[in-house]
Amino acid sequence: MAFGDRILVQARNYSVQVEGLAAAELNRNLGEYLPPNYAVRKMADAYGGYARKRTNTNDEYLLLRQTFTETRSKSHQVFSSVIADHVPSEKYALARSMFQVEDQPATIRGAVRSLQKTGMWKAKFSIPPALVESLRDKVLTRIETIHGDKLTKILEGSPEAPPQIKSNFSWITSFSEMYEVAADPLLLTIVHQYMGVPPIFDVPVAFVNSNVPVSAKDLSDTAQLYHHDMYRLGFVKLFMYLSDVGPKDGPHAMIPGTHRERPDALWADGRHTDEKVAQHGLLDQEARITGPSGTLFLVDTSALHKGVHPEENYRVLAQVQYANSLFGHPIADAERPFTAARKSENPDVLAAGDLVKTYAEKVGVRFMQGMI
């Protein structure tokens, strides 16, 4: 391992170890923060283990999901607040943002308030067209290379088209556009102020959804029924439309405010039909996000949300999750391209490893720690 590479790995390890201070406080004072709960105590112990070992197990991930439901998100709010008290803040060079915004402070304040109140914020500005076109072309070209006529059937509206095609982790992490948008100083500042800590780049993905009729199982499998996400303690997802999305083209939908409050039956993990959401009086509050190609928005997807199934045109979408900690869902060695690149001949892994190093140096090791 080269000297510079070793420094990045050591910095990654230190970034996780800093969370050990938060874990220690939680173990000392948990009873002051939350009512006694066996799952919460186990989660605090597991979080301490993560901060020491820098790894997760699937059992810990399932515990994270279970505790979120049992405490109606209170455990995750407390853990996230304590993490924010211990992880050092960062400032980003707003003058370097790609987005032309006249009043950046007002935009940031408005975005943070919207996320706090509703769990969502849609930007009034768009991703530059050249960047959108480049990312869209790369996504579709790679999907066509892998899936061939399946993509053709989606683009042509064939009744034989699959409901959805999802990117492979290794090749989507080799696209510089994913990092370039996610690392924009304006977006990082908004997410930092909402979560209370410098964001970590996590779970990049791209989708192409077809407009073919689908079954209830297809809707569940493609996240087109209401649900909440729960991979990390605290997180926000950045969504980027790579095609025009009108009301019948598969807009993202969510129930504002349900990242904090919702009827008891809707805290259950798993999928919820529109009928079930309506029974509990929330469907009439639904917000659907439409916009042209280049539209971007942030959503705390611990709220109830779904992708609406397209009826007229296919939809192309890219997203990145920002996390406040990587405690939760395990990260396989193959999903750490910087580390994997030392032993790989895969051009995607090599390209991703170079990008991780570039953005770790540009934005900070914490931003890239899950991929080192």
Image: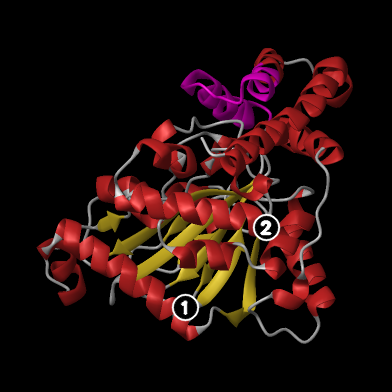
Q: Is residue 311 left or right of residue 4?
A: left
Towards the viewer: 301 or 92: 92
Q: Position of residue 223 (x, y in %)?
A: 39, 50
Q: Position of residue 208 (x, y in %)?
A: 31, 64
Q: Where is mark 2, residue-wise? A: 363
Q: Main secondary structure of the magenta part?
A: helix
Q: Position of residue 344 (x, y in %)?
A: 33, 40
Residue type at tag 2 = Val
Q: Is residue 211 left or right of residue 266?
A: left
- Residue 339 seen from this side: yes
Does residue 52 show up magenta in the picture? Answer: yes
Which quadrant of the structure image shows residue 81?
A: top right
- Residue 278 seen from this side: no
Chain part drawn in magenta: 46-71
* Label of residue 153 in the image: none
Q: Secondary structure at mark 2?
A: helix
* Label of residue 131 in the image: 1
Does residue 266 show up magenta in the picture? Answer: no
Residue at (75% x, 55% y) in the render:
192
Q: Looking at the figure, which quarter contains the C terminus?
A: top right
**CA neighbours of label 1 inside 10 A, class few (<14), some (14 to 19), many (20+):** some
**CA neighbours of label 2 inside 10 A, class few (<14), some (14 to 19), many (20+):** some
